[in-house]
Image (cartoon, rainbow, N blue to C red):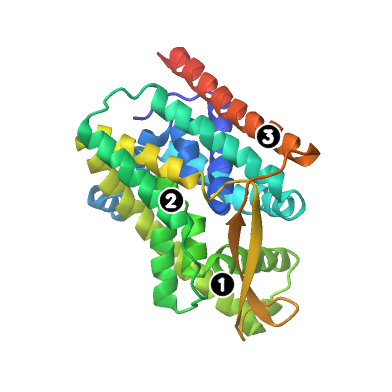
Amino acid sequence: MQSTRTLGDKIFLVIKGLGMGAANKVPGVSGGVVAFVAGFYEEFIYSLQRVNKNALKLLISGRFRSFYRYINGKFLSLLFLGMIVSYFSVSKILDYFLKTHELYVWSLFFGMIIGSIYYINKDFNDWTYKSVIALIIGVSLGIAISFLDPAKENDNLFFVFFCGIVSVSGMTLPGFSGSFILILLGNYILLLVDSVNALYDTFSEVIIGDFSFIENELRVKLLKVLGVFTLGSVVGLVSFSHVLSYVLKNYKSITTASIIGFIVGSLGVVWPWKTTIFKTTIKGDFLLDSRGEKIIKNYERFIPEFQYETYIAIGFIILGIIVVLALERYGQQTTKTHA
């Protein structure tokens, strides 16, 4: 599994991590799609699957180099470095553009998902009645999930831990958006906005020697929530990877067909032309909007009229497709270089 990576490969792997982290933050977009299209999905799953009892034995016995090699540490560390940096940089930029140019951001991701469907489907020829059924189930689940109404926010730590387990599915299962699942569970703002911002603010204060956050009950509570959520995410990531590793080995065709179905179904979530519907709920302890209420977002989709803005959006859709095809071409060239 381990291979000699050039400096360019290492930098590009960090960039792929940036892409996964940014995609995981956007509702309706799956970081797993980035991994699938960029050509490192199976290595990612199999590397995570190596985090098992043998790896734990190596770690406990102090054989850190053996542990690092066993879990394909160079690959995972570069990838997760990109994801972590993304959460405090790229995702911030995405948040800004989602507020100021929402239509074009959704259009770009819509195009990327269309490109992803083409990429995954073009080399898949094992269409049997079982894989067709898996495809239909995947599409149906993707569409059904995209039209569910969000629940109310819940900061119970056991529920937050469960959210961590479920949300990480977007990294391991292409087409299954973990951030959108968090919206349905009612905890997207709490876990991916408020708590992440609390951690960012805390780091900023600690760097300049300000430790006043210790006396800030709200900040401490948000950091505790983020810690439990992160723990749940780690547990979910390792657990899902073991399941998917087994499934990919034994039912690869059915799994691939299901993934194609999920991605097709997710197109409804990222449909660019939609009106944001705001639902609110009173939430006393946490960061609130100007009316003292917590905002929950949902969407009402529509067919656009052909006007200047629509043509620009279509341009971004085409750009998204081109980005995916460019990634595919780079992946093919990299494979030939290492062959």
Q: Would you call the spot at circle 2 few (<14 residues within 10 Å), some (14-19), or many (20 or more)?
A: many
The structure residue drawn at horizontal position 43% and vertical position 32%, both measured from the top left corner, is: 40
Task: Name the element at disc 2.
Answer: helix
Quadrant housing residue 76: top left
| Location of mark 2 (residue) | 143
Q: Label for residue 235?
A: none
Quadrant housing residue 110: top right
Q: Would you call the spot at circle 1 few (<14 residues within 10 Å), some (14-19), or many (20 or more)?
A: many
The structure residue drawn at horizontal position 57% and vertical position 70%, both measured from the top left corner, is: 190
Q: How many marks?
A: 3
Q: Which residue is more in the foreground, 92 or 321?
A: 321
Q: Is residue 82 above or below residue 120?
A: below
Q: Position of residue 244 (x, y in %)?
A: 29, 44
Q: In this rendering, which labeled residue sits more in front, label 2 or label 1?
A: 2
| Location of mark 3 (residue) | 314
Q: Work out whether mark 2 precedes mark 1 in sequence or the reverse, and give the earlier one.
A: 2
The structure residue drawn at horizontal position 47% and vertical position 18%, both measured from the top left corner, is: 332
Identity, as a three-letter code, of the amino acid under mark 1: Leu
Is there any visible trace of residue 336 in the rendered image? Answer: yes
Q: Work out whether mark 3 precedes mark 1 in sequence or the reverse, and give the earlier one.
A: 1
Q: Is residue 223 above or below residue 69?
A: below
Q: Work out whether mark 3 precedes mark 2 in sequence or the reverse, and give the earlier one.
A: 2
Q: Is residue 280 above or below residue 63?
A: below
CB atoms of marks 3 and 1 within 8 Å? no
Q: Position of residue 69 (x, y in %)?
A: 36, 37
Identity, as a three-letter code, of the amino acid under mark 3: Ile
The structure residue drawn at horizontal position 46% and vertical position 37%, both measured from the top left corner, is: 35
| Location of mark 1 (residue) | 223
Label 2, label 1: how far apart the Cα atoms are = 34 Å
Quadrant of the drawing holding the N terminus: top left
Identity, as a three-letter code, of the amino acid under mark 2: Ile
Horizontal side of 25 relative to 57 (left or right) equals right
